[in-house]
Every structure is written in C-alpha cells, then in structure tokens.
Image (cartoon, rainbow, N blue to C red):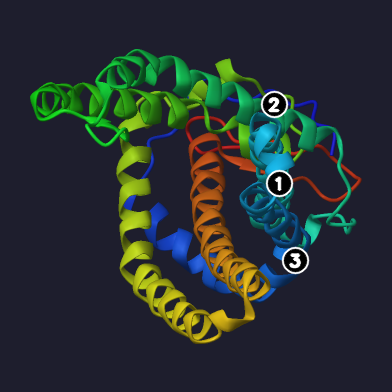
Amino acid sequence: MTVTSTPPPTGRKLAIGEIFSNTYGTCWRLIGKLPGVAAWPFLIAIVAFAVPLVMLYSPAAVSASTIFEIAHYLIMAMSYTLFAVAWHRLVLLASAAETSSPMAWRRRHTVFFGYQILLYVVMVVLTLPVTVFMATLVEPSPGGEPGISPESMETVFTILPIMFVALLVFYYVFFRLCFVFPACAVGERYGLADSWRHTRGNGWRLIIISILVNLAMVVVLVPVVSVLVALISVVAYSGAQGGDAAIIVSALVIGGVYTIAAFVALALNVTLISLSFRAATGWVPGPPAAAPAVWSNGNGGA
C-alpha cells in the first residue's frame, strides 16, 4: 500500500483501559489465525533454538561460539520480524491485507528488521556503563569459578537502582519510537520523528498499558508453561537411557513450548502497539488498491 497523505502533527492521548481491553479482545478474535501466521516463524525459531544444542555437543562449534551466537540471534530476529509484520498487518488491515506467502521477505521486513537492530543498539548504549561496571566486580572464587565476592555484593545492590533507571529510560525511548513498527508493516512513509511526535504525552501511558497487558499474560501463561515443562522434563528424565538423542529431543520440545509462549506474548504486544498507533494517529486503511490510507486529524475528523 502506497500512502501519499500526511500524518497529523500531533497524536491523541491514549485511553489506558480501552487499549488494554481491546488488546485482549482483538487477540481473542484473531486467535484462530495465530497458527497460520506463526507456523513458518515458529519453525525458524526452533532452528535458532537448536543452534545452542549444536554448540553443546560439537567441539568444533564451541571453537566458533561467537559465530553461532550471532547466527542464533539473527535467526530469532528474522523469525520475530516475519511474525510481527504479519500480525501488525492482520490487526490493522484485517480483510484488506493482501494474501502473501508467510515466508516472503519484502522491503517492509527489511525496514522493520533495521528498526529492531537500531533499538537494540540504543538499549546496549543505555545499559553498557552499568554492564561494564558489573563485569569488573566478577572475580575468580577459591574454586576457580567466576563469581562476585561478598564485599562486591554491597556495590551491586547499590547500582541495581541505576540499572533499573537505565532500563526504564530504554523502555520509555522504545515506546516513544515504537509506532515505526506498525507503520512500516503497513507500508507507510513514517519515521522515528513521526513516532516521537505522535507519542508525545503517551510514553508513560504506553509503559503502563504494557505492564498491565504483560502482567495479565504472565498470570495465565507462566503456570501453564511451567506445568508443561515439568511434565516434559519428567518424561525426558525417565527416558534418559536413550542418551544424547533423548536429551536433544526433550530440549527441542521444551524449546518449542517456550517458543509458543513467546509468540503468544509477541502477538499481545504487537496488538498493543498496533491499536495504540491507530488510536493515537487516527490511521485507517483505504479501500484496497483504490485509495491511500487516511490520517484523521487531531480532532477526530478525516
């Protein structure tokens, strides 16, 4: 979809309760489409999860651990990009979304992926000073294992609030810039400056909505995942006579459970950002292949 209309100069204030309830309502309405959207990204994520297993059982891979770690994170990022772009489009375009292969990598995926890398760099920059300082506190223990001495623990507890503030600043910056994700997923000409402008006055609101959405998800999802992982672990332990093959299979199954939970969480958070983007900017899709999308003005008119 090519858009020629101009985004509004400012964004509307978000209603926290409305976005929260609509996030769960929209996900529940679209839950039947989740397996189809997540199928290929899920398989790609399983491949990424298998990379550490290769490192564990292959001495040659251990010697190239840095390469394997980079491959792991890149594959996971590609998997999440494929899913997130498709889910953004499903939420925002609904029936107007074109039918395309879930494996098709288009320009919007590249832009989306680039924004992910950029925000990851921002997070590293914001937390790097504290991380480096924490690393200086790690000392070899009498047994030769690395650890933090009791004397250094007081310092650790002292800087934990600093780490918390750094993470809070990152999440604030992330949510001020997050509208670029749904915008590029639907093909908008929309940049970081547009997102910063439209989220003015909504940064803390988005953080609060995210906390509420994710807390509610954790209450339901964590017990279910914990029980499934415990059951799988019991079965794997009882079949440990199968050797390394049994361990690898059970690890992959557990990884699959965690990956499913991760995609459910991702669907909720993508929905949250999509609905917030639409509510704050007044964006609505135009008729398919007929007209550009419409940006509502700040007073609610078209």
Q: Residue at x 74, y 40 (%)?
A: 60
Comparing labels 1 and 3, the label whose residue is closer to the camera: 3
Q: Which residue is mark 1?
A: 85
Of labels 3 and 2, earlier in sequence is 3
Question: x%, y% of residue 132?
Answer: 35, 15
Mark 2 surroundings: few (<14), some (14-19) or many (≥20) residues within 10 A: few
Three-letter code, disc 2 = Gly
Q: Which residue is mark 2?
A: 114
Q: Nearer the viewer, residue 269 or 183?
A: 269
Q: Nearer the viewer, residue 213 or 22?
A: 213
Q: Residue at x 38, y 73 (%)?
A: 226
Of labels 2 and 1, earlier in sequence is 1
Q: Which mark is residue 39?
A: 3
Q: Quick one: SS at disc 1?
A: helix
Q: Residue at x 39, y 62 (%)?
A: 21
**Figure check: 44 above or below 115:** below
Answer left or right for 238 relative to 288. Answer: left
Distance from the alpha carbon under mark 3 to that under mark 2: 23 Å
Three-letter code, disc 1 = Val
Question: x%, y% of residue 284?
Answer: 66, 45
